[in-house]
Amino acid sequence: MSDRISNDALDQLFHSARTHNAWVKKDVPDELLKELVKILEMGPTSANCSPARFVFVKSDEAKRRLEPHLSEGNRAKTMSAPVCAIIGQDLEFHHHLPKLFPHTDAKSWFDGNDALIESTAFRNATLQGAYFIIAARALGLDTGAMSGFDPDGVDKAFFPNSRIKSNFLCNLGYGDPEGLFPRSPRFGFDEVAEII
């Protein structure tokens, strides 16, 4: 049985954490990005399928490739972020199941079933994207997840000739609190949940 984490940790991960739009000019070291992936990969996915794939857009050249595919409202904040992560999903994830889920022939569950492949990849890569945000916050990074981009354009620019498709983008770095909007309202328990 695990102990409840501290209120300070909950604040860092959820209560005080915000979606950032402005960034302090401070590098995010490559080693920190590697640690981030190592942590998020420990989060559960169905049959350990782990379909998420990550491209950390960090260099000026890579940002120029990404820029034309961003919506107008996301362009400036993404170009000023130290890193923009493309969270994608590998539609050939099942080919790795003999390694990732070796105690049964899980690959055969997916062979020839494109609908199951697509729904499983999308669901679990999105789940891994949530782990990504929580792990980044746990490591002291701020995040700014976004869906305002042209996925076909991003796929052509960053995943050409592959079965990886972009899911969402997430800016990473050290947020400038001056760029924060007031926190938006949240639902109350009874509006979204019930105990039966």
Image (spheres, rainbow, N blue to C red):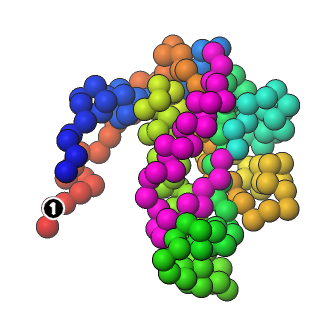
Compare residues 47 and 8 and report the one nearer the observer.
47
**Residue shown at 46%/68% (left/top)?**
46
- Residue at label 1? 195
- Residue 157: x and y in percent read 84, 48
Q: Examine the structure image and report whether residue 47 is included in the region drawn in magenta.
A: yes
Q: Amino acid at mark 1?
A: Ile
Occupied quadrant, residue 121 = bottom right
- Residue 72: x and y in percent read 72, 35
Is 122 on the left-hand or right-hand side of 68? left
**Residue shown at 55%/66% (left/top)?**
100
**Residue shown at 84%/38% (left/top)?**
65
Mark 1 Cα within 10 Å, few/some/many (few <14, many 20+)?
Answer: few
Is 81 on the left-hand or right-hand side of 195? right
When the figure is inspected, residue 48 is found, relative to residue 17, above or below; the finding is below
User: Please, what secondary structure does the residue beneath circle 1 have?
Assistant: loop
- Residue 10: x and y in percent read 30, 33
Q: Quadrant of the C terminus?
A: bottom left
Residue 61, visible in the rendered structure = yes
Is 137 on the left-hand or right-hand side of 191? right
When the figure is inspected, residue 24 is found, relative to residue 88, above or below; the finding is above
Q: Examine the structure image and report whether residue 12 is included in the region drawn in magenta.
A: no
Residue 73, visible in the rendered structure = no
Compare residues 101 and 79 and report the one nearer the observer.
101
Is 179 on the left-hand or right-hand side of 75? left
Occupied quadrant, residue 5 = top left
When the figure is inspected, residue 74 is found, relative to residue 110, above or below; the finding is above
Occupied quadrant, residue 111 = bottom right
Q: Residue furthest left?
A: 196
Label total for image: 1
- Residue 193: x and y in percent read 23, 57
Give the residues drawn in magenta, as a range.
26-54
